[in-house]
């Protein structure tokens, strides 16, 4: 049996019976798995596949750019503008610069 024809959990045929003699049918985990399996099977309906919209590469790029722009706008609106750092020279540096200018002038 080829690797491509195998499904992740061992069955090569998705319609194969998955009943197990070790698990009872009243086991809640088994019931939950059956429910999920049924829901996933309904999602792969061929009629719905025909109705599904697939975007072109141009449309995908446009939507991605719009989404990025929206994220940037949200981030900028949350930014605390009053919290921006103000870089000023400390008094010690100013005094040292004055002294060096005085030394050069003399």
Image (spheres, rainbow, N blue to C red):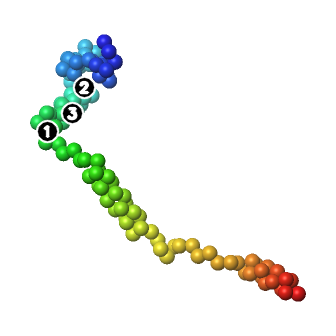
The residue most toward the right is 106
Nearer-the-camera pick, 4 or 56: 56
Name the secondary structure under disc 3.
Answer: helix
Q: Residues within 10 Å of mark 1 (few under 14, many from 20)?
A: few
Front: mark 2 or 3: 3
> First in sequence: mark 2 or mark 3?
2
Residue 5 place in picture, x, y as percent: 28, 19
Tag 3: Cα neighbours inside 10 Å, few (<14), some, or many (≥20)? few
Q: Earlier in the sequence, mark 3 or mark 1?
A: 3
Q: Which residue is mark 3?
A: 40
Using the rendered view, name the quadrant where residue 103 is placed: bottom right
Q: Is residue 13 visible?
A: yes
Q: Is residue 99 visible?
A: no
From the top left corner, tell me how far across and down residue 90 is, in percent. 70, 78
- Residue where numbered disc 1 is placed: 50
Residue lying at 49% horizontally and 76% vertically, measured from the top left: 82
Residue where numbered disc 2 is placed? 30
Q: Eyeballing the image, is 11 above or below 92?
A: above
Task: Tell me whether the residue at label 2 lies in contact with that at label 3, contact meaning CB atoms closer than 8 angstroms.
Answer: no
Q: Residues within 10 Å of mark 2 (few under 14, many from 20)?
A: some
Horizontal side of residue 93 vs 86, given as left or right: right
């Amino acid at each position: 049996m080829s690797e491509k024809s195998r499904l992740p959990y061992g069955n090569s045929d998705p319609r194969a019976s998955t009943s197990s003699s070790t698990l009872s049918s009243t086991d809640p985990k088994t019931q939950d798995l059956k429910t999920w399996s049924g829901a996933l099977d309904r999602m792969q309906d061929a009629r719905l596949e025909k109705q599904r919209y697939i975007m072109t590469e141009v449309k995908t790029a446009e939507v991605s750019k719009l989404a990025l722009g929206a994220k940037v706008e949200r981030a900028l609106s949350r930014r605390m503008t009053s919290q921006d750092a103000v870089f000023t020279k400390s008094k010690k540096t100013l005094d040292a610069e004055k002294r060096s200018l005085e030394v050069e002038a003399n």
